Amino acid sequence: MERTEADTAPKAERAPAAGTAPTGTGPGGGPGGGFVPGGTDEERRRAVRRMKTLATGLLLAVAVVYALAKWAGSAGAGGWTGYVAAAAEAGMVGALADWFAVTALFKRPMGLPIPHTAIIPTKKDQLGQSLGDFVGENFLSAEVVRRRLRSVGIGRRLGGWLAEPKNADRVTDELSTALRGALTVLRDSDVQAVVGEAITRRADAHEIAPGAGAMLEKVVAEGGHRRMVDLIVFRAHDWLVEHADSVMTAVSGGAPGWTPRFVDRKVGDRVYKELLRFVTEMRDMPEHPARGAIDRFLGDFADDLQSDPQTRAKVERLKSEVLGRGEVQDLIASAWGSVRAMIVAAAEDERSELRLRVRAALLSLGRRLSDEERLQSKVDGWLEGAAVYVVTTYQSEITSLITDTVAGWDAEQTSKKIEAHIGRDLQFIRINGTVVGALAGLCIYAVSQAFGG
């Protein structure tokens, strides 16, 4: 398949920038202009052609001057013709030498197979490798990266930027948008499965009995359970008062069938009164024996949870049974939906506590970064370390991007591309060679005339 210039171009062509100089005028409006640094390759080639025409025209001009000076000298015009002829002759030599040097970069002069010519087409891959090595050694070294980042002072600049309320608001908005986007991309079923598995696995991996026993022991020692006992006793008393008939009926109904009914009612009434008395006394007497029995029971149970193997094994079996129930797994999984909805709502609400706290944290961080040199040094050190790690770890991959890209270019098209970008300046070398050669020839001829003439 024939390769087009666009396919082999080493650098993407760019459209001419708005407001650039029109073709025909150089950077200073001088002759041979039309070169626009941001222009297209075609504009650059036209500028190079104009400069080639100018350089070649200057060569032809000094050739004509040389011929006229020689003719005038042979016609007896005077000694000045020798100076002009010497200057023109040296100018031609300088122009031809520089024409050869410039042409040899991009192609073989006049198509002749002269060694060390057409350097760019024949040495393209080596030039790409050298360019990659140069970038790696001089731009991607750890010391260069550290020195450059240290001179920038990113921590201090970041602090000053974050300390501005409008910038903190902007960062908060961006973080909220990113958070909402992340939560939108995540599938609820996947997250619920992960959360459920993580909770279940963590619960299975840790025995809960010793921890629960230690916590219960501390609660009992501090008397924290007594409020719960008070609540239960008060509620039990109120319930007995409200449901006296139900209690007596339940007691009477459990009596044998051969006992008289009045005896059953008498027993039921007696049981109810004793039960009510017991609950009332327990409610009103902080030192009631039943309360002490509860304290001892809870203390013993806390000790068993920590040290009794059978109790601990029972608790672990109960834990496994509870976690294995579908209702519990559904409850664990559904927790993600609630958390997700809460986070999304907070991220969307500009006055939510979440966003206000994030904004306040950013402003505080900005002020600290602006004022505290120690924190600035920390942030700069983190960034330097991260950047150095990237450039040192992936230096070969970064430089290979250069070498591989250059290696994939077409040699002829690459030569044309490079000539389009730097050829105009190279034509100035030809012009300068003509002028400098003429001046050098004039000086040499003048010296030779002065000392040998």
Image: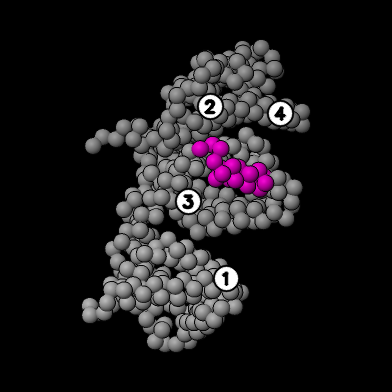
Q: Which mark is residue 443?
A: 4
Q: Residue 399 carries which label?
A: 3
Q: Range of the magenta residues? A: 349-366
- Labels 2 & 1 near each other (Cβ < 8 A): no
SS for callout 4: helix
Splitting the image into 4 quarters, where does residue 427 fall?
Answer: top right
Distance, label 3 to label 2, CA atoms, is 26 Å
SS for callout 3: helix
Distance, label 1 to label 4, CA atoms, is 127 Å
Horizontal and vertical percent for residue 364?
67, 46
Callout 3 environment at 10 Å: few (<14), some (14 to 19), or many (20+)? many
Quick one: label 1 or label 4, which is nearer the N terminus? 1
Q: In this view, does 152 lie above or below 165?
A: below
Residue designated by label 1: 284
Which secondary structure is most common in the magenta stretch? Answer: helix
Residue at 47 percent across and 85 percent down: it is: 304
Quick one: label 2 or label 1, which is nearer the N terminus? 2
Amino acid type at mark 2: Pro
Horizontal and vertical percent for residue 440?
67, 30
Position of the N terminus, as image quadrant, is top left
Quick one: label 3 or label 2, which is nearer the N terminus? 2
- Labels 1 & 3 near each other (Cβ < 8 A): no
